Image (tube, rainbow, N blue to C red):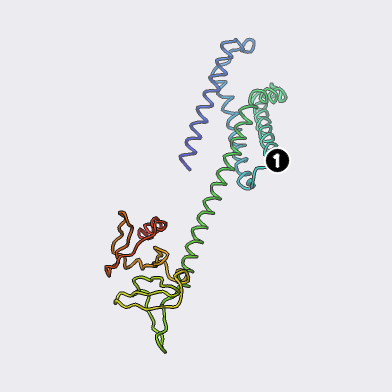
């Protein structure tokens, strides 16, 4: 913020000196000095300083108004309102400048003449400057609103992930005879589709058959279980290596090899890097 303000101040100083030098060149080259007097560069510079000090003060008020009355979207009505605001702001600037000049001259200069002169002299650059300011404030506010939206979406995504993990099953169970066998998730190496059932392979080398589908389990299992193929879900904690040369396959810690579907390779790489 400080860097931007410094850059703005330097740009304004350069503009003031440029306009002063430009006006002095015209006055001196075309002998536009008032009769019996000589207009110096210092006098022109003083007039420019007064003008831009007034402009800066009014610009600060415009900034305050725009930040407290942001533009929700650009349409015909808002453009008409902003155009009127820019014109009104410029006229207020001219009026204040004329009042200051009349006061400094002790009433020797005409208020109306100063207003008319400044309108013709400064209208293009003054209106463009205020219009540019309105656009920049609008873009800044939209950028800030977008960043807040992204931050909120990220927070929401994290919350949804936490909710999903809290709702995930903690164990699997399957019926064996008249009893049920409980299988801890951290002991499961992989789950393989088998017709209308699935085979659950554990780190102890056992295999349990469950009457369910991979699709159903995929929705319930925590994030460290990844479906690498239409027939296989693996526990990422048991992945020892991933070979992607020719036939893409995963080598599990029990030395089993499981093929990875081409459509899942990119997502699987991402899952492994988390």
Figure quadrant of residue 244:
bottom left
Figure quadrant of residue 45:
top right
Against 105, residue 87 (above or below) is below
- Residue underneath mark 1: 76
The residue sitting at 65% across, 43% down in the picture is 74
| CA neighbours of label 1 inside 10 A, class few (<14), some (14 to 19), many (20+) | few
- Quadrant containing the C terminus is bottom left
Q: Residue furthest right?
A: 112
Residue 89 horizontal/vertical position (percent): 66, 35
Residue 103 horizontal/vertical position (percent): 66, 28
Q: Residue furthest front?
A: 195
How many discs appear? 1
**Closest to the observer, 3 or 185:** 185
**Closest to the observer, 171 or 14:** 171
Residue 202 horizontal/vertical position (percent): 33, 75
Against 151, residue 214 (above or below) is below
Task: Report whether 274 appears left or right of 21.
Answer: left
**Closest to the observer, 162 or 22:** 162
Against 162, residue 70 (above or below) is above
Q: Secondary structure at mark 1?
A: helix
The residue sitting at 56% across, 11% down in the picture is 29
The residue sitting at 32% across, 60% down in the picture is 249
The residue sitting at 63% across, 46% down in the picture is 70
Q: Residue furthest bottom?
A: 178
Against 253, residue 86 (above or below) is above
Residue 138 horizontal/vertical position (percent): 59, 43
Task: Report whether 174 appears left or right of 21.
Answer: left
Task: Report whether 120 appears left or right of 248.
Answer: right
């Amino acid at each position: 913020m400080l860097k931007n303000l410094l850059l703005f101040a330097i740009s304004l100083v350069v503009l003031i000196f440029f306009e002063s030098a430009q006006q002095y060149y015209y006055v001196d080259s075309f002998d536009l000095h008032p009769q019996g007097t000589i207009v110096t560069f210092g006098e022109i510079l003083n007039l420019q300083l007064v003008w831009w000090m007034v402009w800066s003060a009014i610009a600060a008020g415009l900034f305050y108004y725009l930040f407290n009355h942001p533009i929700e979207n650009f349409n015909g009505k808002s453009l008409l309102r902003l155009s009127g605001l820019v014109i009104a702001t410029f006229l207020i600037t001219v009026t204040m400048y004329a009042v200051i000049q009349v006061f400094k001259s002790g009433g020797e200069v005409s208020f109306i003449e100063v207003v008319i002169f400044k309108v013709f002299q400064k209208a293009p650059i003054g209106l463009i400057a205020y219009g540019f300011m309105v656009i920049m404030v609008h873009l800044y506010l939209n950028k800030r609103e977008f960043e807040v939206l992204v931050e909120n979406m990220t927070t929401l995504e994290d919350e949804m992930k936490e909710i999903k993990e809290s709702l995930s099953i903690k164990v699997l169970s399957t019926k064996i005879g008249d009893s049920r066998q409980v299988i801890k998730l951290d002991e499961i190496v992989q789950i393989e589709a088998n017709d209308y059932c699935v085979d659950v392979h554990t780190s102890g080398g056992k295999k349990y058959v469950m009457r369910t589908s991979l699709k159903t389990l995929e929705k319930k299992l925590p994030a460290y279980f990844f479906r690498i193929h239409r027939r296989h879900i693996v526990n990422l904690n048991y992945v020892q290596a991933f070979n992607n040369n020719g036939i893409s396959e995963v080598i599990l810690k029990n030395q089993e090899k499981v093929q990875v579907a081409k459509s899942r390779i990119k997502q699987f790489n991402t899952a492994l890097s988390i």
